[in-house]
Amino acid sequence: MTAGGLGRTTTQRATLFTQGEPFVFESGASLGPVEVAYETYGELAPDRSNVVVICHALTGDAHAAGHHGDPSRVGWWDNLIGPGRPVDTDRFFVVCPNLLGGCQGTTGPASINPQTGSTYGLEFPLLTVRDLVGVHRALLGHLGIQRVHGIVGGSLGGMQALQWALDFPTEVDRCVLAGVSARLSAQNIGFSAVARTAIMRDPNFQNGEYSGSGVSPDVGLAVARMMAHLTYVSEGSLREKFDRRRQGPDEAGMTFATDFEIESYLDHQGRAFLDRFDALTYIYLSRVMDYFEPFADPSLQLAAVATEFLLVSFDTDWRFPTEHSLFILDSLVAGGAKARHEEVASPWGHDSFLLDVARYHEIVGDFLVA
Amino acid sequence: MTAGGLGRTTTQRATLFTQGEPFVFESGASLGPVEVAYETYGELAPDRSNVVVICHALTGDAHAAGHHGDPSRVGWWDNLIGPGRPVDTDRFFVVCPNLLGGCQGTTGPASINPQTGSTYGLEFPLLTVRDLVGVHRALLGHLGIQRVHGIVGGSLGGMQALQWALDFPTEVDRCVLAGVSARLSAQNIGFSAVARTAIMRDPNFQNGEYSGSGVSPDVGLAVARMMAHLTYVSEGSLREKFDRRRQGPDEAGMTFATDFEIESYLDHQGRAFLDRFDALTYIYLSRVMDYFEPFADPSLQLAAVATEFLLVSFDTDWRFPTEHSLFILDSLVAGGAKARHEEVASPWGHDSFLLDVARYHEIVGDFLVA
């Protein structure tokens, strides 16, 4: 944890499917080519035994660690990945792909459909977590990798890690699932439904065909992000960080403009998100999570799963609270799989999985090398 | 609680201020006339000693009890108010006004400004809870009432009851504050800020001048309502009521349309709200709550407050959890006022204050007649 970071990293691209040999979705739909953006860190061992895959969450991308030229702007999981860090790049060859359906280099609903010359929009097939895993596996095949030492993911990232191990247990030695759910609650689905309503009823959404129109559903996407962000952080951390502090003097009178610091913060979160994310990807990937329920799959055969699982939940995460991790733990253990869980104290709510929480990093690091 | 209801009730109207003698807001702004819609239930005692005022919350109105012709559609607090009920109309003369800034009969931002012939829109002054109380007191003066036996309010309604008793303690014998906060948290303000963003950035908001344009910020208002509703109910009650149930068969495949029952429910909540509520009132009254912080007022002199307070919070209310009530209790008691608090077990979250929770109704009824 005291070692330096990765230094400069680069996003690479691979074309994994073609129009003639398309990717087939779980729904039966198919599509090609599929471009995948990914990054790798560290060196692949000659026996290819040291691969760790990083699966990103709803709004992540392939740029998990290092920087792209500006050392002050590092990847979204740079605190976890690097030389001497829990996902130790002196030891592991780390691969992080942008998800199918994404908007940062991997084919998604905002990509051009070669059959029409226009963006896919809502013609893009609805996705499952299995579809995300299918493209990840194709990327590993492209890199000559058939088996991985570990998969690490938080939130939607953990869903991919879990599904992968359940479906292909001989390919995955260890799985780290941080702040994960395998069965979204009505409240979870409700928040996602409000976010999608804000986006899809934004008049600039234009039934998903906003590309090239000069406008996009920025209001809906910003509102979705602001609301989601509020649910990713704990009430206590917001109190600590903002309480009722105002930007101007308290005597300045009332206004509908951003006055309380929490308003300014959320407004910034909403606007900054527009620079890096696409509304179609948001609705597709949030919908993936709603439908994810792997332990309800009648074809599931847990006894065959040899993967070892580490589940980490955070005591202030109210979006995917500890009971969601315990449900996964109980389901895995009841089926004979090897799994353990730890609830880690952290003030930052669901976002804790992205943050440098000492105990969390310690157990992830230990688990990957034990 | 077993007696019949009030039967048919009628909304009445009063004109309380004029252009020449306007209502003066706490901010110094002024406005007239102020029309107030209100309902009354029960009979005023000859000595006028039996008055109970009901203060409604953000989306309430003057029609608290009885029905307007259809006995199956009763007022929003009909379970609390009526013959033999906790606010017993055989004993009390009950008055419920629509708030200043409202949109159901009382002058608000969607009302016509007589000076311009157009709606006030964003020219309507920003409000404080004191302003709401000021108009309530003017209505009581109009009815010949100088002192009340009790004021009962939940959420924003409780804020009015509290402010009234703090400012005019000799006018108020008893105050019931259910599910109240006297100091919104950063999370509370954050949710309100997201709601206002959804409304005010809706292109149909047109800087508040949507009246007569043929369109209104329906998307923003529906999104605001859907999100707020999710925060008013508990995670457990949503699980109990909806869990992950779908409207169609589970095998029906994935869709962006409303599929899970919780989606259909929220969609209905959002759309139905448009029929009865105005977007301007929503942003004005939510902003009132953000700024409400009576115990930070340096002019407050609690020792003079003779009013007795009953505070009720609900164990599953995560919008205004028990700690908010305890803050009010501690502030009142530290200042020498007479107050007691009870946390009532109820599965329904913040909305519990509107529902027929036996223990809650019992202590409110007892408190008003003790």
Image (cartoon, coloured by chain):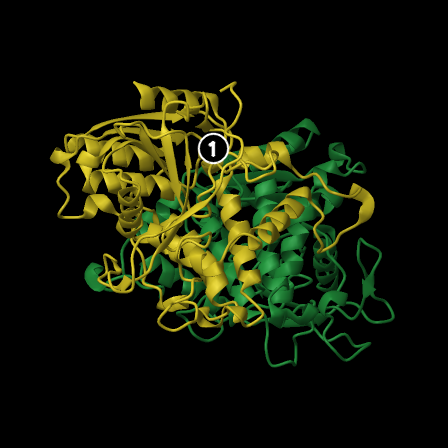
Chain colours: A yellow, B green
SS at mark 1 in the image: helix
**Marked residue chain, label 1:** A
> What residue type is disc 1 on?
Ser
Could you say which is closer to the camera, residue B133 or residue B41? B133
Q: Give the left or right position of residue A286, taking residue B47 as reference.
A: left
Q: Is residue B154 visible?
A: no
Image mark count: 1
Percent from the top left, x then y, of residue B299? 81, 38
Q: Give the left or right position of residue A219, taking residue B7 as reference.
A: right
- Residue picked out by circle 1: A352
Crowd rating for badge 1 (residues with CA inside 10 Å; few <14, some 14–19, many 20+): many
Question: Quick check: A280 above or below A322?
Answer: below
Q: In which quarter of the image is residue B123?
A: bottom right
Percent from the top left, x then y, of residue B96? 60, 60
Percent from the top left, x then y, of residue B211? 66, 77
Q: Give the left or right position of residue B194, taking residue A127 as reference.
A: right
Q: Is residue A268 visible?
A: yes
Question: Quick check: A146 above or below A132?
Answer: above
Q: Quadrant of residue A107?
A: bottom left
